[in-house]
Image (tube, grey):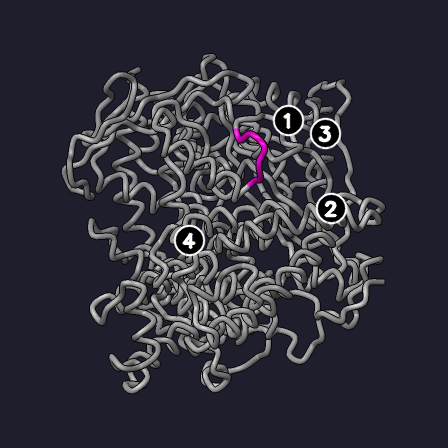
């Protein structure tokens, strides 16, 4: 190890921001720096009176609640010695001259950002309505804001360990895998590398940075930065009332407003994080100015007048929180406490408002260095100032300081926080940090009692819900994160690579005379369309995985399933040939993951482009054109699902008297997962017509069906009707013989009633 660089106090909140919260030090409590004091400063500081370092008269100091003191107290501290740590960004394993490289890079970024922030504060001090920022300056601010969160003390503590085993966060396996890949020995190297990558990667107009960054640093944190950059917009807020102020704590730049869920591991009893949904994030600039980052899915008056934009945002919203209204201020069902915050996106010079709607002024829009953004200083009510300050106070369990300017404003803020209902002020003791938050709350109460506070603090405790298989849940999230990470790095998953290899290497299989090409071309494809269809199918699957991953743990499973159905509904409008490729990619992935097989082993099973979907395609003339894609997809998905349990007899253990039977439940899901899974909607007119006749006869003859619950009776009716249609399928009753040759009709019967619409055998005995 190289020799250690000189000790240096390194701020995780830059001094140029801290100075906005400072005032000149007045040891005698006087009115400011006197002429005599100024003379003393100009001549030097050697006089008979002893002063603390950094606390000479006139030096910038910050008033703060010191949470590290015993007992906690309100004190003043030099700007140079607050919200920082010794050698925080140093890498002792590097040569001496490189150990402080990250600190130097941070200083350079702060130099760029400080000038922009000075423009913001100066415009506010001059009582201007707002200010204009060009795109390049806005990009600097957004990068700087993310790093204010990522560089703070909590992340230092998370990564600062001597070995990979010291890193114990939920993504520990992913971080350790990354360390092995990079040859890192300490988690701190992952963190420092990420900070350097974010600073040195320019936000270019072509958006190449979004592809480059995941390859330069730990992918999941790169994804986090990209999501923050794209999924939140920036606004500037100032208190409406002159005496209201914002406070600042160690992690003000890292906390959020939104749902944060915890569970108790049923096996270990340990409290673990389940999901979190940031709706608003914050960056205090001064006691009178704050940046609020708002999730783009929240309502926007101008944007939402466009019907397609509004519907897409609603779809995104439900992926995150479920079907409740996003603009509710009821946090009990995932709403936002700050939904009523009167903010909006900055206006720009590439759009205009026409008849109350946003209209683009550029026919072919793309990011330009000439784009500018007009920000407004939004005046916000005291209730919103209190909520924001309350979020800071509620999350300062690990903090050292609560910074403020006006003592009276801070006292009012503290008293509101301690007595406000928990529904709007937090103070709910649950989750992984419940103990440290309780300690911090008690310190605040003691300090408030010291100045005469006599109110009754309102605090509540909550039990975390039990999750029996938490580790299974965590591993599922990790596996999805791995797939998202590979996608973000531009890597193709094994299934996609296998498909590409099949197209590239197996020339006989894909020659014009091959069965694949004959079927593909019968669906309107050609050699020219294969690359595009393969690429689009991969993108479709990536989006499916991405949506599943990002909504996991955040919404109920039935909501996630409905969202999958909405996405599939959109996909099924695409050409059937593309759905066929997508279906095979999906099938290959499912079989590989379920049976733990390599893609080449699955190829040997002859299920990829040789599965039952080929029969559907060869008989496409009897299928309604608008239903062909759906029939291909359902057949492929069911084929993959059935192969999860090779050799299983679907009907041997099926018990129509017990929906709790494992096999019965599995069959029911396969047979009738949703209404569209009924053979009634198969898209073959002859079967759809026969369905109605068989059903009517069945309900007249089998009166015992009325004994079952409506849902179970529907399942039994479906199965019995399938059996009836299966019996007459090749008998001439349906009239299909005139449209399909006999051999193909027999093959189609097997596919439809064994795979697409699983049906009990003719000798099946109902219990």
Disc 4 marks which residue? 624
Near mark 2 (Cα within 10 A), the count class, few <14, some 14-19 or many ≥20, is few
Residue 736 horizontal/vertical position (percent) = 48, 63
Mark 1 element type: helix
Label whose residue precedes the other's in the sequence (1 or 4): 1
| Residue at mark 1 to residue at mark 3: CA–CA distance | 18 Å
Disc 1 designates what residue?
424
Q: Quadrant of the N terminus?
A: bottom left
Part of the protein shown in magenta: 321-326
Q: Quadrant of residue 100?
A: bottom left
Q: Nearer the viewer, mark 4 or mark 3?
A: 4
Disc 2 designates what residue? 711
> Which of marks 4 and 2 precedes in the sequence?
4
Q: Residues within 10 Å of mark 4 (few under 14, many from 20)?
A: some
Q: Which element carries disc 4, helix, strand or loop? A: loop
Q: Sequence order check: which comes first, mark 4 or mark 3?
A: 3
Is 686 or 486 nearer to us in this picture?
A: 686
For residue 445, the mark is 3
Q: CA distance from mark 2 to mark 1?
A: 41 Å
Q: Nearer the viewer, mark 1 or mark 3?
A: 1
Q: Residue at x 79, y 56 (%)?
A: 659
Query: Which numbered disc, 2 or 3, marks the residue closer to the eye?
Result: 2
Which of the two discs, 2 and 3, labels the residue nearer the N terminus? 3
Left or right, residue 740 beside residue 653: left
Q: Earlier in the sequence, mark 1 or mark 3?
A: 1
Evaluate if marks 4 and 3 touch, with contact meaning CB atoms under 8 Å apart: no
**Which residue is drawn at the image coordinates 54% and 59% (left, top)?**
734
Question: Along the horizontal axis of the image, is 477 left or right of 369?
Answer: right
Residue 454 image offset from top left, x and y in percent? 76, 18
Tell me the distance, in whole angstroms, between the alpha carbons under discs 4 and 3.
71 Å
The mark closer to the camera, 2 or 1, is: 2
Would you identify the image quadrant in which residue 66 lies? Answer: top right
């Amino acid at each position: 190890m190289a020799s250690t660089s000189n000790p240096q106090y390194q701020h995780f909140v830059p001094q140029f921001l801290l100075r906005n919260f400072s005032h000149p030090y007045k040891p005698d409590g006087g009115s400011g720096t006197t002429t005599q004091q100024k003379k003393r400063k100009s001549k030097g500081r050697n006089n008979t009176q002893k002063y603390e370092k950094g606390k000479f008269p006139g030096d910038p100091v910050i008033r703060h609640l010191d949470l590290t003191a015993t007992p906690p107290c309100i004190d003043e501290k030099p700007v140079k010695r607050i919200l920082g740590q010794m050698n925080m960004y140093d890498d002792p394993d590097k040569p001496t001259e490189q150990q402080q490289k990250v600190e130097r890079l941070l200083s350079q970024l702060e130099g760029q950002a400080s000038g922009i922030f000075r423009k913001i504060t100066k415009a506010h001090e001059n009582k201007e309505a707002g200010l204009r920022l060009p795109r390049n300056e806005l990009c600097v601010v957004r990068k700087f804001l993310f790093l204010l969160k990522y560089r703070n003390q909590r992340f230092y503590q998370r990564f600062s360990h001597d070995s990979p085993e010291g890193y114990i966060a939920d993504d520990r396996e992913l971080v350790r895998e990354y360390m092995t890949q990079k040859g890192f020995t300490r988690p701190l190297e992952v963190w420092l590398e990420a900070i350097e990558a974010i600073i040195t990667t320019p936000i270019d107009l072509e958006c190449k940075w979004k592809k480059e960054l995941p390859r330069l640093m730990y992918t999941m944190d790169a994804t986090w930065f990209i999501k923050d950059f794209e999924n939140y917009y920036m606004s500037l807020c100032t208190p409406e009332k002159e005496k209201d102020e914002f406070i600042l704590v160690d992690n003000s730049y890292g906390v959020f407003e939104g749902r944060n869920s915890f569970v108790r591991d049923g096996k270990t009893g340990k409290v673990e994080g389940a999901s979190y949904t940031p709706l608003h994030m914050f960056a205090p600039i001064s006691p009178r100015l704050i940046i609020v980052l708002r999730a783009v899915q929240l309502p926007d008056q101008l944007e939402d007048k466009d019907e397609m934009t509004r519907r897409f945002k609603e779809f995104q919203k439900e992926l995150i929180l479920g079907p409740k209204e996003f603009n509710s201020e009821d946090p009990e069902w995932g709403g936002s406490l700050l939904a009523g915050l009167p903010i909006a996106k900055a206006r720009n010079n590439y759009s205009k408002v026409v008849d109350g709607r946003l209209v683009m002024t550029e026919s072919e829009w793309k990011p330009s260095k000439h784009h500018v953004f007009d920000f407004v200083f939004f005046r916000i009510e005291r209730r919103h100032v209190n909520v924001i300050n309350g979020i800071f106070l509620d999350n300062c369990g690990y903090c050292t300081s609560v910074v403020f300017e006006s003592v009276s404003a801070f006292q009012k803020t503290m008293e509101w926080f301690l007595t406000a209902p928990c529904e709007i002020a937090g103070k709910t003791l649950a989750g992984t940090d419940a103990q440290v938050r309780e300690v911090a709350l008690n310190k605040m109460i003691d300090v408030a009692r010291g100045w005469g506070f006599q109110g009754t603090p309102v605090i509540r405790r909550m039990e975390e819900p039990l999750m029996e298989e938490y580790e299974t849940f965590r591993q599922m999230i990790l596996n999805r994160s791995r797939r998202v990470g590979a996608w973000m790095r531009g890597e193709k998953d094994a299934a996609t690579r296998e498909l590409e290899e099949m197209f590239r290497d197996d020339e006989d299989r894909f020659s014009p005379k091959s069965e694949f090409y004959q079927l593909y071309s019968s669906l309107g494809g050609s050699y020219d369309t294969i690359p595009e269809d393969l690429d689009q199918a991969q993108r479709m699957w990536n989006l499916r995985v991405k949506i599943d991953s990002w909504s996991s743990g955040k919404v109920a499973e039935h909501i996630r399933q409905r969202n999958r159905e909405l996405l599939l509904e959109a996909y099924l409008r695409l050409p059937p040939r593309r759905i066929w490729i997508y279906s095979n990619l999906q099938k290959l992935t499912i079989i590989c993951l379920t049976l733990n097989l390599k893609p080449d082993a699955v190829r040997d099973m002859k299920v990829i482009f040789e599965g039952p979907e080929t029969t559907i395609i060869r008989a496409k003339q009897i299928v309604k054109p608008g239903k062909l894609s759906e029939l291909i997809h359902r057949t492929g998905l069911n084929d993959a699902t059935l192969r999860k349990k090779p050799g299983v007899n679907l009907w041997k253990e099926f018990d129509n008297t017990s929906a709790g039977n494992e096999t019965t439940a599995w069959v029911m899901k396969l047979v009738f997962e949703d209404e569209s899974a009924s053979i009634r909607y198969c898209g073959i007119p002859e079967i759809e017509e026969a369905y109605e006749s068989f059903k009517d006869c069945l309900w007249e003859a089998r009166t015992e069906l009325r004994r079952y619950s409506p849902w179970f009776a529907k399942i039994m009716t479906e199965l019995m009707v399938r059996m009836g249609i299966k019996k007459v399928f090749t008998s001439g009753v349906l009239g299909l013989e005139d449209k399909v040759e006999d051999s193909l009709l027999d093959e189609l019967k097997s596919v439809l009633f064994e795979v697409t619409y699983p049906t009990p055998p003719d000798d099946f005995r109902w219990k």
